[in-house]
Image (tube, rainbow, N blue to C red):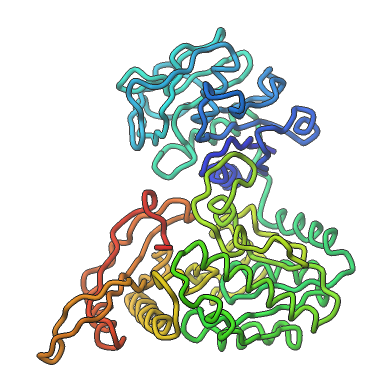
């Protein structure tokens, strides 16, 4: 296996994902993990992630056990990880005279296993304010950039490598080859891990965690909760009950779809709860997105706790939490920054009665789909586009009420229908409508209107950590706009969002 030590980068999990794509098992551990904790595993190599800190910061700058860097296993330091390699070895790291953020070109200056088979000039993705200005003893320069910065270094004797750029992100085109070189040529790993291995591991973990107790699964109808339910069902069978909370914030026809698809699987162990009035009452007058998410997270748990009492003695709640939910909501394993609170992570109440079972929390969306296929779930479920846990509440900017929820639901239905009709649904990661709290002047039937604006958002992505706006054909956008204005009462203008992530997020709230 390969271990990734997390120093707080927003893309730490991407590193692990790239390793698993090579069919090599990988785990993420906190940067504070000791060599004694790591060496007992079937370890072939260690990757040090990037991070937002500076090695020259205060005493609290994240570091690692010196034993990890003594040459017993190969190490690859990425961004902050490279700076840590240099700093720990006695080199000098300082603020860069010219910071590098975004695309850059590096020149490979010395042959090495890390760049085997690659051209001498490579496009990479940089994101750093510090730089290594003097290498430690025993290290050599492998590559540089146009401003003379050290882009890659190595200590051949100890098999220590450092790259200042991020090979794990899609913006570094040859990043997969660089990681393959480290995994296979430097570490000597073999491609033997597969999704069926994950199923076996998680089934045993769920059984061990739940024991003979009963669990309830938070079923939403989306990909994540469906796969979590299927995995938990394989592990504990009839000990699992599923509850679908109809909070009135779902997509068009969601309750009926859940009843049709999952009723045949779980029978009487599927409970559909109508909690629309309860959620809307709690959300009344609340416009702050973080408060909305936390209200929804709290109410979800309260409903599950209430329903679990009716079912019997239940101790566990199964959720389809994914890694992007965790990494944006809180620092999971390292000192990462909070981007937004997901209702099922930071939005959960502190005094929960149920213990969480989260079998998907180390996976990305595309990995979840692969897992679902391994479990035999149909494409009708697996190929659905992501939908936020807080539902349409975060697609109505500002306070939520029945009227504006109905407006954004209808607009959202039209967006989905038109991209399906155009045959581009599966090419787009996510497409949806957002109701903006702005009124604009229009003219309909020769009369003046003063109505609201719908923004259409569509993005392409591999994992939701980064995304680009989708270049939807003009005629499809025209049909979407025409239908929304004609069919959604109260809307007289449609805009198309052409921002990427970063700097924007996929959802508006």
- Quarter of the rendering occupied by the N terminus: top right
Above or below residue 342? Residue 332 is above
Above or below residue 159? Residue 455 is below
Can residue 492 be seen by looking at this rendering?
yes
Front in this rendered view, residue 497 or 229: 497
Front in this rendered view, residue 312 or 152: 312
Can residue 113 be seen by looking at this rendering?
no
Residue extending farthest left: 446
Instruction: From the top left corner, tell me how far across and down residue 95 is, in percent.
Output: 41, 21
Residue extending farthest front: 285
Instruction: From the top left corner, tell me how far across and down residue 190 is, in percent.
Output: 66, 38
Is 65 left or right of 410, judged from the image as shown? Answer: right
| Residue in the picture at 55% in, 44% down | 18
Residue extending farthest bottom: 445
Is 281 left or right of 238, judged from the image as shown? Answer: left
Is 143 left or right of 60, judged from the image as shown? Answer: left
Instruction: From the top left corner, tell me how far across and down residue 375 is, in percent.
Output: 68, 68
Quadrant of the image occupied by residue 133: top left
Above or below residue 503? Residue 159 is above
- Total labels drawn: 0
| Residue in the picture at 79% in, 29% down | 36
| Residue in the picture at 64% in, 25% down | 74
Quadrant of the image occupied by residue 157: top right
| Residue in the picture at 63% in, 69% down | 298
Front in this rendered view, residue 283 or 76: 283
Front in this rendered view, residue 285 or 358: 285
Instruction: From the top left corner, tell me how far across and down residue 330 is, in percent.
Output: 59, 50
Quadrant of the image occupied by residue 3: top right
- Quarter of the rendering occupied by the C terminus: bottom left
Residue extending farthest top: 137
């Amino acid at each position: 296996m390969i271990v990734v030590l997390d120093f707080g980068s927003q893309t730490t999990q991407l590193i692990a994902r790239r390793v698993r794509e090579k069919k090599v098992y990988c785990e993420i551990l906190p940067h504070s993990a000791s060599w004694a904790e790591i060496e007992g595993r079937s370890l072939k190599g260690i990757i040090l992630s990037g991070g937002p800190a500076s090695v020259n910061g205060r005493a609290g700058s994240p570091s690692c056990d010196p034993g990890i860097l003594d040459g017993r296993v190969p190490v690859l330091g990425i961004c902050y990880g490279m700076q840590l390699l240099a700093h720990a070895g006695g080199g000098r790291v300082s603020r860069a005279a010219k910071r590098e953020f975004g695309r850059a070109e590096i020149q490979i200056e010395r042959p090495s296993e890390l760049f085997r088979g690659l051209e001498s000039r490579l496009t990479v993705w940089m994101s750093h304010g510090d730089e290594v200005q003097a290498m430690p003893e025993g290290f050599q320069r492998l590559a540089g950039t146009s401003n003379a910065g050290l882009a890659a270094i190595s200590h051949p004797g100890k098999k220590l490598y450092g790259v200042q750029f991020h090979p794990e992100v899609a913006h570094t085109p040859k990043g997969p080859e660089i990681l393959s070189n480290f995994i296979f040529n430097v570490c000597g790993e073999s491609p033997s891990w597969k999704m069926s291995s994950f199923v076996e591991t998680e089934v045993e973990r769920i059984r061990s965690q739940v024991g003979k107790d009963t669990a309830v699964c938070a079923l939403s109808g989306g990909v994540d909760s469906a796969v979590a339910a299927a995995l938990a069902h394989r592990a504990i069978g009839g000990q699992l009950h599923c509850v679908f909370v109809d909070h009135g914030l779902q997509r068009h026809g969601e309750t009926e779809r859940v009843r049709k698809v999952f009723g045949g699987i779980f029978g009487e162990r599927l409970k559909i709860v109508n909690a629309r009035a309860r959620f809307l009452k709690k959300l009344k007058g609340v416009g702050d997105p973080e408060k909305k998410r936390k209200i929804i997270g709290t109410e979800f748990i309260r409903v599950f706790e209430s329903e679990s009492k009716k079912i019997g003695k239940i101790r566990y709640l199964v959720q389809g939490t994914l890694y992007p939910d965790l990494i944006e909501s809180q620092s999971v394993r390292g000192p990462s920054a909070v981007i937004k609170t997901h209702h099922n992570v930071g939005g959960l109440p502190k005094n929960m009665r149920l213990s969480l079972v989260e079998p998907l929390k180390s996976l990305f969306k595309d990995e979840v789909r692969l897992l679902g296929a391994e479990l035999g779930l149909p494409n009708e479920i697996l190929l659905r586009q992501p939908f936020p846990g807080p539902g349409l509440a975060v697609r109505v900017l500002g306070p939520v009420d029945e009227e504006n929820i109905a407006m954004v639901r209808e607009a959202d239905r039209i967006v989905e229908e038109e991209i399906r009709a155009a045959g581009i649904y599966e090419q787009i990661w996510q497409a949806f409508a957002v109701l903006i709290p702005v009124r604009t002047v229009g003219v309909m039937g020769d009369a003046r209107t003063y109505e609201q604006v719908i923004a259409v958002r569509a993005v392409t992505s591999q994992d939701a950590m980064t995304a680009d706006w989708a270049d939807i054909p003009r005629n499809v956008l025209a049909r979407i706009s025409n239908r929304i204005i004609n069919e959604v009462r109260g809307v007289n203008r449609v805009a198309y969002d052409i921002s990427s992530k970063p700097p924007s997020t996929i959802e508006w709230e």
